[in-house]
Image (cartoon, rainbow, N blue to C red):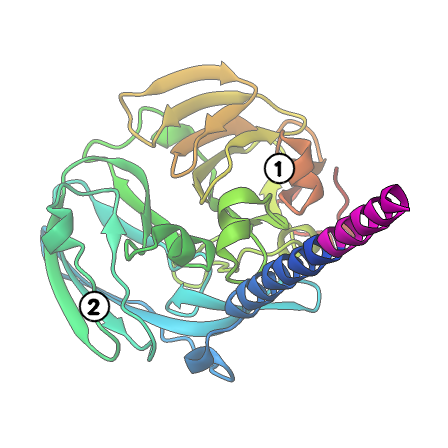
Amino acid sequence: MKRKFYTFMSIVVAALFLTACEHTGGKEAEKEKTKAGTHHANSGVIAAHKGLQQKPIPLKMERIGPHDVHIEMTAQVTDIEIDKGKMYKAWTFNGQVPGPLIVVNEGDTLHFTLKNMDPAMPHSMDFHAVHASPSKDFADVMPNQTGTFTYQANNPGVFMYHCGTKPVLAHIANGMHGMMIVKPKNGYPTDKEVDREFVLIQNEWYKYNDMDDFQNGVPSYVVFSTKALKAGGRNTNGDTFTLKEKPLVAKVGDKVRIYLENVGPNEVSSFHVVGTIFDDVYIDGNPNNHLKGLQTVMLPASGGAVVEFTVTRPGNYSIVTHQFNHAQKGAVAILKVTETGEDDGAEASGR
């Protein structure tokens, strides 16, 4: 009888123990679920940005002396269409992603002003093209404030710029990046051979304002944009479709120059043009870094280059990153080559 009683009590104790464990486990699971839900909620549009759609303010740039340039840029929140019907409430410079192209000359002094229209957070500017004291020259500009800084652009090339405010990854991934070209004092050795010039910038898009995805995920989209080298030129945002539907155009026999920048923030670009070979490549756009006959140019995050190639036959030349998982996510542009150098109106197609 005693043995039966002890056996019965053992079963009861074990059952109570298992119930307690399940109850505790359930609480822990609920905690994790709540934490995950909170994280998801925090990864959305921040309260001060909800419903905010600031009209893009154009870049202000003026040469005020032989070697002095005034540049005024604006930090603002603007909706960007990154895929057909897919809007992203981007943190931007001047309502563009990537931001506006800046072109200066080697040896120029830049008198830079940043206006911050973002009501919620500070922003700043980190120019890769200059020597500076980051804590002073790339300092945060508070909401609804203006900061003015001065730098010299003494190195020629193609450079990234981006917001340098912590966490830097969030500011870049949400859209605050762009390209600066510092034109070489003595030009490039191939200047007289070039017939057409374009700008291409590669960037990535992730889940909206999701720091975990920025750090640990893979991009949802990888895209190209073009920026105007001259007044009236094309100026697009980084999306999956524009440069496929409305290609860049060149003439049979043209030597084409492309100023390139991979603004990342995380991935490498393996830049390639299908159907041709790069005659000349200037790594980081510096004339001293001259290579010839490359099939693909590797651009790290923030890396730039100038590439030149000749188009010998009419057709559609796909411009891609040869990391084709990224090309599949949008990183394809089309260069349409015709006998006249004009768009013939035929539908573009590419890889």
Looking at the picture, how far across and down is residue 254, in whole percent? 55, 33
Query: Seen from this angle, which residue lies furthest bottom?
Result: 51
Q: Is residue 71 above or below residue 185?
A: below
* Number of other residues with Cα within 10 Å of mark 1, as a class: few under 14, some 14 to 19, many 20 or more: many
Q: Which residue is mark 2?
A: 141
115 left or right, relative to 26: left
Residue at point 91%, 46% (across, down):
1
Looking at the picture, how far across and down is residue 79, in whole percent? 53, 73
Residue at point 48%, 60% (across, down):
235
Q: Which residue is mark 1?
A: 319
Circles 1 and 2, Cβ within 8 Å, touching? The answer is no
Quadrant in which residue 286 is drawn: top left
Q: Main secondary structure of the magenta part?
A: helix
**Quick one: label 1 or label 2, which is nearer the N terminus?**
2
Separation of marks 1 and 2 at Cα, in angstroms: 37 Å
Of the pair 47 and 320, the residue shown nearer to us: 47
Q: Is residue 36 visible?
A: yes
Residue at point 11%, 60% (across, down):
149
Q: Which residues are magenta?
A: 1-18
Looking at numbered disc 1 in the image, what kind of residue is underneath it? Answer: Ile
User: Element type at marker 1?
Assistant: strand
- Which image quadrant: the C terminus? top right
* Number of other residues with Cα within 10 Å of mark 2, as a class: few under 14, some 14 to 19, many 20 or more: many
Q: Is residue 64 visible?
A: no
User: Element type at marker 2?
Assistant: loop
- Let me know if residue 195 is in the magenta part: no
Q: Is residue 49 above or below residue 166?
A: below
- Nearer the observer, disc 1 or disc 2? 2
- Let me know if residue 2 is in the magenta part: yes
Looking at the picture, how far across and down is residue 298, in whole percent? 48, 26
Looking at the picture, how far across and down is residue 340, in whole percent? 64, 44
